[in-house]
């Protein structure tokens, strides 16, 4: 009860955060111009001066992490926003700079039996997205895009390709609703929390669910707009859907941040089968199972439910936790199986996710806080990385870089362009954005094989001998197979 009372004392803070939602904002249009000063920390590459991803710092020595690369989509306080792949050393594997800071939920999925890259892009003033979803193949070319049906626009919080090659995603749609029952204006508006399942090739809507009126306004913990504002009041984001997960039984598990609740939705009828958490929970919740302002609810293969328990904002807990819950639907009781927290007791005010990997490891993106961490099953830290300025405390949007989610996946990228090469002084700088199978770089000098060095970073520098008239750099696999070669250049 105390946590609920504390919320009432910080409604101003809550409203400020809610107006920026999960931290996505249309910076150029909505934000004031920042004071003159140094740009956010970024990386520079001689061979690819067009790429300026945020700086990355590995904290400590990595342990025995799971296979694969790290996938995130830096935005907010960055020079360039876009999808980014990293290795465990913090080295860039692939980065695609976008012409907008509206990017979210970058990950590997499977479409028509093949691995693909997917992400959302668009605009998101007030944390509510209007955009589309893109699907790229292993050559980094777009092969499909998905838009919401029925005249809606796709939101930032989720894009999930199912085993049926359909797509699940949320939609936020404004409706005129009388808000006097919760102290708001009579001529008020709400964001109806919607999710759709769409057939990707045709765009046909297969399923659609609406939070309103199934979930009432009084279930929300978010403060309503002031009645005095009348028709000028902003829409009331009373629900805030932020994850959708298809369950083995065919139903859907969804999370709503602003009601502090998870819902199971019947695929056939669209009815709410149960609520976990919030003001109308159907479950008795055991010690440690409470959660507030949560994200990323998932049903795991063993039947447990996992989620990212922000605990803020406004702050209700002292630190953010990743929860593993056993939910007994017959006895209607939820018990805590395990929880994970960062050693620095990070408190993420918005965004975040927890990916449970096949080997028992847990990969956590801390959302608004520019960190990602891999734990073993017992909660020991195996990898801890910061990016941007690496601030461990964030109280409002645009204080540092962030990434709505972060993931780990195995990925093999095969770009169709050539390795990029630049000569500066007595060195040859080479990189190949997105090429994952390069083991060595070999110089070819005036048509003859030269020095070969191991590929250790996104960009490597090779010594250039004197009196060379033409230089080509050849990319070699671990077995010595030629994967690609740069255009020949002259010193």
Image (spheres, rainbow, N blue to C red):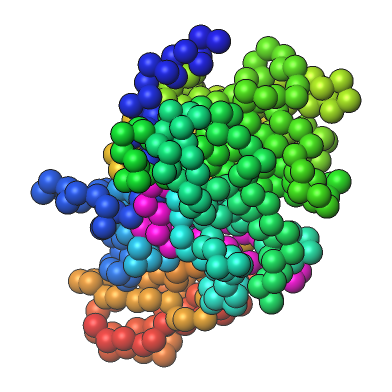
Residue located farthest toward the right when viewing the structure as drawn: 330
Front residue of this view, candidates 489 and 224: 224
Q: Position of residue 402 (x, y in %)?
A: 40, 44
Front residue of this view, candidates 250 and 477: 250
Q: Residue at x 43, y 28 (%)?
A: 183
Q: Quadrant of the N terminus?
A: top right
Note whether 433 is above or below 253 in the view shown: below
Horizontally, is 196 left or right of 177 in the view? right
Q: Position of residue 198 (x, y in %)?
A: 68, 65
- Residue span colored magenta: 101-127
Q: Which residue is drawn at 45% across and 46% down?
A: 189
The magenta stretch spans residue 212: no
Q: Quadrant of residue 457?
A: bottom left
Note whether 211 is above or below 283 in the view shown: below
Q: Residue at x 19, y 49 (%)?
A: 32
Regarding residue 455, the answer to whether it shows in the image is no
Q: Where is residue 58 in the image (x, y as percent from the top left)?
A: 43, 40
Q: Quadrant of residue 122?
A: bottom left
Q: Residue at x 66, y 20 (%)?
A: 289
Residue located farthest toward the front when viewing the structure as drawn: 186
Q: In which quarter of the image is the C terminus?
A: bottom left
Looking at the magenta stretch, what is its main secondary structure?
A: strand
Regarding residue 270, the answer to whether it shows in the image is yes
Q: Position of residue 237 (x, y in %)?
A: 47, 41
Horizontally, is 331 left or right of 279 in the view? right
Front residue of this view, candidates 402 and 436: 402
The magenta stretch spans residue 105: yes
Horizontally, is 305 left or right of 401 in the view? right
Q: Quadrant of residue 446?
A: bottom left
């Amino acid at each position: 009860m105390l946590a609920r009372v504390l919320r009432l004392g910080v409604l101003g803070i809550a409203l400020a955060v809610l107006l920026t939602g999960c931290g996505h904002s249309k910076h150029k249009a909505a934000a004031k111009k920042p004071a003159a000063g140094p740009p956010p920390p970024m990386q520079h590459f001689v061979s690819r001066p067009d790429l300026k991803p945020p700086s990355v710092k590995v904290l400590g020595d990595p342990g025995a992490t799971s296979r694969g690369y790290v996938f995130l989509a830096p935005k907010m306080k960055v020079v360039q926003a876009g999808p980014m792949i990293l290795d465990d050393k913090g080295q860039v594997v692939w980065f695609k700079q976008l012409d907008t800071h509206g990017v979210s939920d970058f990950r590997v999925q499977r479409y028509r039996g093949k691995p693909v890259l997917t992400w959302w892009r668009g605009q998101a003033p007030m944390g509510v997205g209007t955009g589309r979803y893109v699907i790229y193949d292993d050559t980094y070319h777009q092969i499909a895009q998905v838009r919401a049906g029925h005249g809606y626009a796709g939101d930032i919080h989720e894009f999930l390709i199912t085993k049926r090659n359909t797509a699940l995603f949320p939609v936020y749609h404004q409706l005129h609703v009388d808000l006097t029952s919760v102290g708001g204006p009579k001529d008020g508006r709400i964001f109806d929390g919607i999710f759709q399942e769409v057939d990707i090739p045709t765009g046909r809507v297969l399923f659609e669910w609406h939070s309103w009126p199934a979930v009432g306004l009084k279930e929300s913990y978010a403060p309503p707009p002031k009645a005095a504002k009348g028709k000028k009041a902003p829409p009331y984001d009373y629900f805030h859907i932020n994850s959708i997960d298809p369950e083995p039984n065919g139903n859907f598990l969804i999370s709503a941040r602003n009601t502090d609740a998870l819902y199971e939705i019947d695929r056939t009828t669209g009815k709410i089968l149960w609520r976990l958490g919030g003001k109308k929970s159907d479950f008795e919740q055991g010690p440690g199972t409470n959660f507030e302002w949560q994200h990323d609810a998932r049903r795991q293969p063993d039947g447990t439910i996992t989620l990212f328990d922000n605990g803020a904002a406004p702050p209700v807990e002292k630190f953010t936790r990743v929860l593993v819950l056993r939910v007994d639907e017959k006895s209607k009781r939820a018990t805590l199986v395990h929880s994970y927290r960062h050693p620095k007791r990070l408190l993420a005010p918005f965004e975040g996710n927890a990916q449970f990997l096949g080997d028992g490891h847990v990969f956590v993106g801390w959302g608004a806080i520019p960190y990602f961490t891999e734990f073993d099953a017992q909660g020991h830290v195996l990898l801890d990385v910061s990016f941007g300025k690496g601030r461990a405390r964030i109280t409002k949007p645009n204080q540092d870089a962030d990434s709505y989610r972060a993931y780990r996946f195995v990925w093999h990228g095969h770009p169709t362009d050539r390795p990029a090469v630049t000569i500066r002084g007595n060195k040859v700088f080479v990189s190949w954005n997105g090429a994952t199978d390069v083991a060595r770089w070999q110089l070819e000098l005036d048509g003859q094989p030269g020095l070969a060095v191991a590929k250790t970073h996104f960009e490597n520098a090779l010594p250039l001998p004197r009196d060379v008239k033409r230089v080509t750099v050849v990319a070699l696999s671990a077995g010595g197979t030629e994967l690609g070669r740069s255009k020949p250049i002259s010193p």
